């Protein structure tokens, strides 16, 4: 991973073998921010696990094993009540047949590269808290 910071804009390059969630969490700790918007991301990734939340509030997961083009990535980075960095990311991939796969990203490993723009919300604190009856951790602002 390498990154550059310009005012509130953080641009990061993730390298082969790096898992997106864990690397961005480390970046949040390294740079030292509590809230950020992930505005874009492109690249080529593998070992993706993605899905959606059903009507009962339960995440349904799907595997996308072969390397695919990371077409779009967005989300946010907040903190848990324990102060740990927490990423919430949605993605869109295009496989080698140009079939699109999209949804909530649970896991994603960089195959060639991932280039991601993050906007730090320097005057905000976002905390992820449990919500009743769903797997999603909700956002609380302070």
Image (cartoon, rainbow, N blue to C red):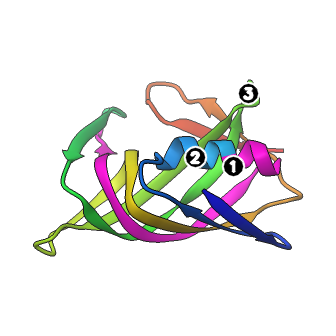
What type of secondary structure mainly makes up the magenta span? strand
Observer-side mark, 1 or 3, equals: 1
- In the rendered view, does 96 fall on the left or right side of 27? left
Observer-side mark, 3 or 2, equals: 2
User: Considering only order in the chain, which callout, 2 or 3, is on the residue closer to the N terminus?
Assistant: 2
Dot 2 alpha-carbon crowd within 10 angstroms: few under 14, some 14 to 19, many 20 or more: some
Q: Which residue is mark 1?
A: 27
Tag of residue 78:
none
- Circle 1/circle 2 CB separation < 8 Å: yes
Residue 73 percent across, percent down from the top left = 46, 65
Residue 16 percent across, percent down from the top left = 42, 55
Instruction: Determine the CA span between mark 1 and mark 2.
Output: 6 Å
- Residue drawn 29% across the image and 53% down it: 46
Q: Secondary structure at mark 3?
A: loop
Tag of residue 81:
3
- Please tell me in which quadrant of the rendered image residue 93 appears: bottom left
Per the rendered image, the range of residues in magenta is: 27-55
User: In which quadrant will I find the N terminus?
Assistant: bottom right
């Amino acid at each position: 991973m390498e990154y550059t910071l310009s005012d509130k804009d953080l641009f990061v390059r993730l390298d082969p073998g790096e898992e997106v969630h864990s690397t961005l969490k480390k970046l949040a700790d390294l740079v030292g921010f509590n809230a950020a918007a992930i505005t874009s991301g492109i690249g080529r990734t593998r070992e993706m696990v993605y899905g959606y939340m059903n009507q009962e509030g339960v995440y349904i997961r799907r595997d996308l094993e072969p390397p695919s083009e990371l077409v779009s990535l967005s989300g946010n980075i907040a903190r848990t009540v324990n102060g740990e960095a927490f990423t919430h990311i949605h993605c869109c991939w295009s496989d080698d047949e140009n079939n699109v796969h999209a949804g909530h990203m649970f896991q994603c490993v960089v195959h060639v590269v991932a280039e991601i723009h993050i906007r730090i919300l320097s005057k905000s604190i976002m905390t992820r808290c449990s919500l009743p009856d769903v797997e999603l951790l909700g956002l609380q602002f302070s």
